[in-house]
Image (tube, rainbow, N blue to C red):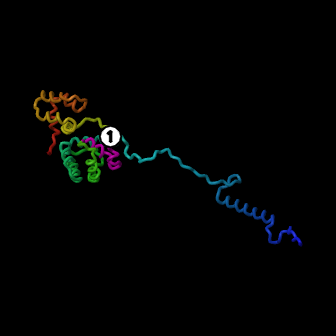
Amino acid sequence: MRNKREITEYSEVAFSLADAQRLIQELTARLEKLEQQSSPVIDGKAQLPSVTVETSNKKRGPRKRVPTPELLERRKNLNTWLEQNWPFLSVALRKANYSHEALTAINAAKEHIPGVFQPDFYRSTEKYEEPLWTFLRSGRFHGNPRNLAAAMAGLPELSWKRSFDICSEHPYKGGIAVQAYWDYMRRNFPDRLRELVEVRTTEQVRLVLARSRTKDSIYLHLKAHPDKALEWLSRGKPSQT
């Protein structure tokens, strides 16, 4: 059988080594040109664009929009005004069945005893009818004007809950207005208040107050001034029943 002749030559259409080298050189030249167009050249070398990764040390979470000292100052002013009006407000807010009734009570108190240097809740109470009513029904009111002041002082920058929580971390230690003495005793020492209503003399007041051993500052203040206790309590007696 005749063997086929081995083909050792490239045909004219074959891809030669010279062609491959020429193609590589062309591709290299094109790549260098593209790099020069897309990246700056420094000292004859193309520079790749740098990537900046921003880092932050800030903690996540809502930003505090009312400095705590300012919030506490608002609370103090609002609390003073509320306590001055408490003989009326203590009853009106407890008896309110609807949000507009609570709003009406606050506005009536502003006409009775105006306040100064008050937070936005006082100046524009109508805007806060909903948070006022929500707080009064939240179970955190307890008929206490200081709780109400703590919740409303941060509006509108803070929610009433956030305002209440911050103020709770910094209890108000200022004195209580005389107009709030009656309701304070009603909430904290109801038995002693009922007994004090029935007495008339300084000695009788002294005997009644001696029945409770407590370190409560308001109670001790009344105990130290039995001759003034009945007068102070009468100034805070509810104006409505």
Res. 14 visible in picture: yes
Q: What is the x, y in percent for residue 157? A: 35, 49
Q: Residue at x 25, y 35 (%)?
A: 175
Q: What is the x, y in percent for residue 122? A: 27, 48
How crowded is the residue under tag 1: few (<14 C-alpha within 10 Å), some, or many (20+)?
some
What kind of secondary structure does the magenta stretch mostly adopt? Answer: helix
| Front one among 21 and 227 | 21
Q: Residue at x 79, y 66 (%)?
A: 19
Instruction: Count the marks.
Output: 1
Q: Quadrant of the C terminus?
A: top left
Q: What is the x, y in percent for residue 147? A: 27, 42
- Residue 234 lies in what quarter of the image? top left
**Above or below, 108 relative to 69:** below
Q: Residue at x 20, y 29 (%)?
A: 212
Q: Tag 1, which secondary structure?
A: helix
Q: Is residue 10 left or right of residue 35?
A: right
Res. 148 visible in picture: no
> Residue 161 colored magenta?
yes
Q: Quadrant of the N terminus?
A: bottom right
> Residue 106 colored magenta?
no
Q: Is residue 157 left or right of residue 208?
A: right
- Residue 15 lies in what quarter of the image? bottom right
Which residues are the magenta region? 144-164
| Front one among 115 and 11 | 11
**Above or below, 66 relative to 1:** above
Callout 1 amino acid: Ser
Determine which residue is flagged by label 1.
Answer: 168
In the current view of this chain or complex, which residue is farthest to the right? Answer: 2
